[in-house]
Structures are given as structure tokens and as C-alpha cells.
Image: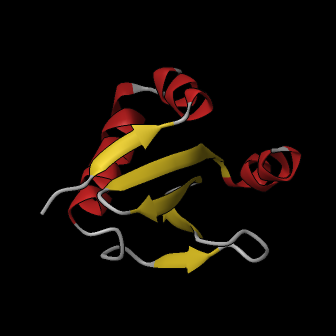
Amino acid sequence: MSREILLSRDSAKFIEKLSDEEKNRIRDALLQISEDPYSLPYKKIRGKKGLLRIRVGDYRILYQVTGNEIWVVLIDRRESVYKKLKNK
């Protein structure tokens, strides 16, 4: 059973700026979590209820699972994703 992936505006903009190879890696990870959001090694984000993250190379994908939807809150490089999360 596949879940619907919903991207935040920031996530969509970030993906647009990536090279084709990087876009494909992110897309593959998103497709995999749409099938099973817990299939890839994930970690819970402390202090943010229900927020999970997966690692795709130097990038981090932060997402929440709600029913049949997966809300991708933020995608960015490791060194800046947590700073941006603090500001949200």
C-alpha cells in the first residue's frame, strides 16, 4: 500500500535546485518511504513529536507520517537542515 507524499514549499524548491543525479537519489528515497515509511534507517527528531529523518548521502529528509500521507517537512544538507528546523 503506497502512501501519498506531500512536499512542503521549501522541500520542493530545494529539490528543484539539485542536479539530476541528486534528484534521482532523493526521489528514490521518497518512493521507498511512500511504500513503507519505516523501511529505511530512520531516526526520531528529539523535541518534535512524530518527526522522523532519513539520510540520503549528505542530505536529510525530515518527514511525518499521518494516516495515508507522508508530509515532507524539510530537505536540506546535513549542516543546515537542523538550523532551519529550529526556525520553523
Check the image and tell me how it is coloured: secondary structure
Q: Position of residue 74 (x, y in %)?
A: 61, 45
Q: Is residue 12 left or right of 86 when viewed as pictured? A: left
Q: Report how many numbered discs are placed on residues in the image.
A: 0
What's the residue at 61%, 77% (across, down)?
A: 44
Q: Position of residue 49 (x, y in %)?
A: 67, 72
Classify 61 as above or below 52: above
Classify 20 as above or below 51: above
What's the residue at 27%, 56% (across, down)?
A: 34
Residue extending furthest toward the front: 67
What's the residue at 78%, 56% (across, down)?
A: 82
Classify 46 as above or below 2: below
Q: Nearer the viewer, residue 48 or 84?
A: 48
Q: Position of residue 70 (x, y in %)?
A: 40, 54
Quadrant position of residue 6? top left
The N terminus: image quadrant: bottom left
What's the residue at 36%, 76% (across, down)?
A: 38
Q: Is residue 49 left or right of 87 when viewed as pictured? A: left
The C terminus: image quadrant: top right
Q: Is residue 49 left or right of 65 when viewed as pictured? A: right
Q: Position of residue 42 (x, y in %)?
A: 49, 75
Q: Is residue 87 left or right of 62 when viewed as pictured? A: right
